[in-house]
Image (cartoon, coloured by chain):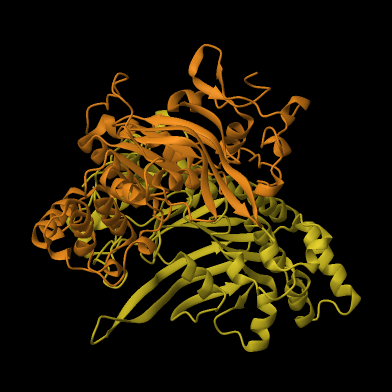
Chain colours: A yellow, B orange
């Protein structure tokens, strides 16, 4: 760790009003350029050693958050500050040193590893490039990394295709660890894995978080995995954070109607608490042409006139919990909402 | 259909006297690897009645999809074969049928939907045409009549503004809507049996809930026997009537859904549940299953789970039978320790 460590209590990563609009060409035979607002004013922070979960459905912008924070894509607006350094304005040398401390693990390690590169080289390359070790020392570092993620030293001589999905994800994690990062963006790291292997990887990540005091931005669509791994969660819907809060509370009593719908739709292995299936129709609208006001209003059972016109701001409604919903505009509204029947039995219908 | 039953439909009554819509007896399917044949599905037997859902659960490589492909007669020739067993659908033996006979059965008596609808749909044909195709082929309908029926089917699976979308192409649909199109195709000829292979795995949870609800509703209306193949025990708890857990090609546990979740008995079933992080309760330490599923050539003889099992005894070198638990004849477990 070369750069100055953040003082205690100071967040490691601060993101303010991050925005990104993609231009896409749609239509045939004459394509029209359309704007996709992938991120629309996203703000959050992560403390050292903390795991922040970002949940949401496909197309809500959760992967774009990771890419924009790492400057793998350039954000249009907003501030990303990591350990006091402005990532957005960092020059190439500064960015290089930042990237040592900010790493990413992808969903599909098979497509993130070079199929013609032995594991020793895949892990050794960043170590060499960043000048962390030289010569014989590189091999020793690789062996240490493999051991840390639970792979035998013999793995170094093999190629990615010789490993199972779970083992490949261990290699992906080892590569992210190679430069001794402080924060890892994990983009659906266990989604492609079977339950038993998924549990192995989650246990490994938890060990690493505690041993190395690693912070995580853990992106997932699986509420169960996030509840298990994260201390705080941000729920995204069409480019905006709609709810954010500490982990036990947000799952025990979700406040935003969308978070409630997500929880009610997540199947649990208990026939007595079957998922609130209903014939309610409606899908997330296209981010190309999102509805005005609150993006969730066309699917929301509590939608009011105000929701169709004005986008609600993300504001604190209970200590430590922020919600972007007009139901919580007046003081006392939170109590009103929480006094309703339990979310798992409520059938959210239009 | 536990959840939906309360919401919209009267409880699906499964009459024991009614003959099963599909019966599978002693199905063994083999796969050829490097010139040798290995049993990838061993001696699997079950039946599914009309309006009943049987869930086949397990991790990748446990043989659940291979079971489905065997039933459909879709094992790739030369690489896969049915080595033993009988598959009887609607009183007709599928295994005895020739290719033309199988072709007539598929679509007509059994429909199947897959995980990723985009790879099953033809990207250059309108969806209405693809739904109508089954009716033209199997029912000998004229184009116009088939198109009209296709529209009815799209309305049946609740695709909004179906009439306008009859001529739309698959890429113009969302994932959930594409899966509805697949369901419409599978149901075009009113089959008795629907095989759903991971039908909601590629979908977001809120869309998954909609598609499961739709399937449950159609099942009651059309009197379908559903064989649901999934890795998700949460989905099983929500929609299945009975469960079969597979490991390494063997059925290791078979039970009514409530009995299974109340008392998961095979060490593998138990381990699967302990490895699953849950959204409905405070997080406990996860207990991963050590190691991984052995490849087919490396499968131990006897109990196939023994290499990962904490309860292993010497007798596990012999293959245990699928024994009923004392006092629960419907709850059967393949384990020398738990069901000797």
Would you identify the image quadrant in which residue A185 lies?
bottom right
Residue drawn 24% across the image and 62% down it: B130
Relative side of A251 to A111, left or right = left
Q: Residue furthest right?
A: A136
In the image, residue A141 above or below residue B77: below
Residue at the image point whose x is 66% and y is 77% from the top = A98
- Residue most extreme to the top: B327
Number of numbered discs overlaid on the protein picture: 0
Q: Looking at the image, which is closer to me, A136 or B59?
A: B59
Q: Quadrant of residue A177?
A: bottom right
Percent across and percent down for residue A288 are: 30, 73
- Compared with residue B62, is residue A133 higher up or lower down, i.e. above or below? below
Q: Nearer the viewer, residue B289 or B85?
A: B85
Relative height, residue B237 to residue A141 (above, below): above
The residue shown at (86%, 71%) is A139
Q: Position of residue A259 (x, y in %)?
A: 38, 49
Q: Which quadrant, please, contains the N terminus of chain A?
A: bottom right
């Amino acid at each position: 760790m070369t750069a100055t460590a953040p003082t205690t209590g100071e967040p490691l990563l601060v993101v303010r009003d991050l925005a990104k609009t993609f231009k896409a060409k749609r239509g045939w035979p004459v394509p029209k350029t359309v704007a996709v607002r992938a991120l629309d004013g996203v703000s959050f922070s992560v403390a050292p050693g903390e795991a922040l979960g970002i949940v949401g459905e496909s197309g809500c912008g959760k992967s774009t958050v990771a890419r924009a924070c790492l400057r793998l894509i350039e954000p249009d607006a907003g501030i990303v500050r990591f350990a006091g350094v402005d990532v957005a304005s960092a020059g190439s040398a500064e960015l290089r040193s930042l990237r040592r401390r900010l790493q990413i693990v992808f969903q599909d390690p098979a497509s993130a590893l070079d199929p013609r590169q032995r594991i020793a080289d895949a892990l050794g390359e960043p170590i060499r490039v960043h000048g962390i070790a030289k010569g014989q020392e590189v091999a020793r570092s690789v062996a240490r990394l493999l051991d840390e993620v639970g792979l035998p030293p013999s793995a170094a001589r093999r190629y990615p295709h010789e490993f199972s999905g779970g083992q490949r994800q261990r290699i992906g994690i080892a590569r992210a660890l190679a430069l001794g990062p402080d924060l890892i963006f994990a983009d659906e790291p266990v989604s492609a894995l079977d339950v038993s292997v998924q549990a192995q990887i989650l246990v490994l990540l938890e060990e690493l978080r505690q041993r190395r005091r690693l912070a995580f931005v853990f992106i997932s669509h699986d509420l169960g995995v996030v509840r298990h791994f994260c201390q705080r969660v941000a729920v995204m819907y069409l480019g905006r954070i709609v709810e954010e809060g500490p982990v036990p509370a947000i799952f025990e009593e979700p406040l935003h109607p969308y978070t409630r719908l997500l929880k009610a739709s997540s199947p649990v292995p208990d026939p007595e608490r079957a998922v609130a299936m209903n014939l309610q129709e409606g899908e997330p609208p296209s981010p190309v042409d999102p509805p005005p006001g609150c993006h969730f209003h066309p699917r929301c059972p509590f939608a009011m006139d105000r929701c169709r016109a004005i986008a609600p701001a993300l504001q604190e409604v209970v200590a430590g919990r922020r919600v972007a919903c007009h139901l919580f505009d007046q003081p006392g509204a939170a109590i009103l909402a929480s006094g309703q029947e339990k979310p798992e039995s409520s059938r959210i219908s239009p | 259909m536990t959840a939906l039953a309360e919401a919209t439909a009267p409880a699906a009554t499964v009459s024991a006297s009614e003959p099963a819509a599909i019966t599978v007896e002693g199905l063994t399917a083999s796969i050829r690897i490097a010139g040798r044949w290995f049993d990838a599905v061993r001696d699997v037997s079950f039946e599914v009645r009309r309006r009943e859902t049987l869930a086949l659960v397990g991790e990748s490589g446990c043989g659940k999809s291979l079971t489905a492909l065997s039933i459909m007669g879709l094992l790739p020739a030369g690489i896969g074969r049915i080595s033993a067993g009988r598959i009887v659908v609607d009183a007709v033996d599928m295994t005895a049928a020739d290719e033309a006979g199988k072709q007539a059965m598929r679509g007509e008596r059994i429909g199947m939907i897959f995980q990723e609808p985009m790879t099953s749909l033809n990207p250059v044909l309108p969806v209405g045409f693809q739904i109508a195709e089954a009716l033209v082929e199997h029912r000998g309908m004229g184009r116009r009549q088939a198109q009209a029926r296709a529209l009815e089917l799209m309305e049946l699976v609740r695709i909004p503004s179906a009439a306008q979308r009859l001529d739309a192409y698959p890429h113009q649909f969302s994932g959930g809507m594409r899966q509805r199109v697949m369901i419409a195709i599978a149901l075009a000829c009113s089959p008795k049996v629907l095989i759903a292979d991971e039908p909601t795995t590629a979908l977001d949870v809120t869309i998954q809930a909609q598609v499961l609800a739709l399937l449950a509703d159609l099942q009651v209306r059309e009197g379908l026997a559903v064989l649901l193949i999934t890795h998700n025990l949460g989905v099983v708890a929500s929609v299945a009537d009975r469960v079969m857990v597979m490991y390494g090609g063997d059925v290791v546990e078979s039970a009514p859904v409530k009995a299974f979740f109340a008392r998961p008995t095979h060490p593998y079933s138990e381990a699967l549940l302990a490895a699953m992080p849950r959204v409905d309760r405070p997080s406990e330490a996860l207990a991963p299953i050590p190691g991984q599923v052995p490849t087919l050539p490396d499968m131990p003889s006897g109990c196939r789970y023994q290499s990962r099992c904490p309860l292993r005894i010497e007798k596990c070198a012999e293959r245990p039978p699928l024994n009923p638990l004392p006092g629960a004849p419907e709850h059967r477990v393949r384990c020398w320790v738990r069901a000797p």
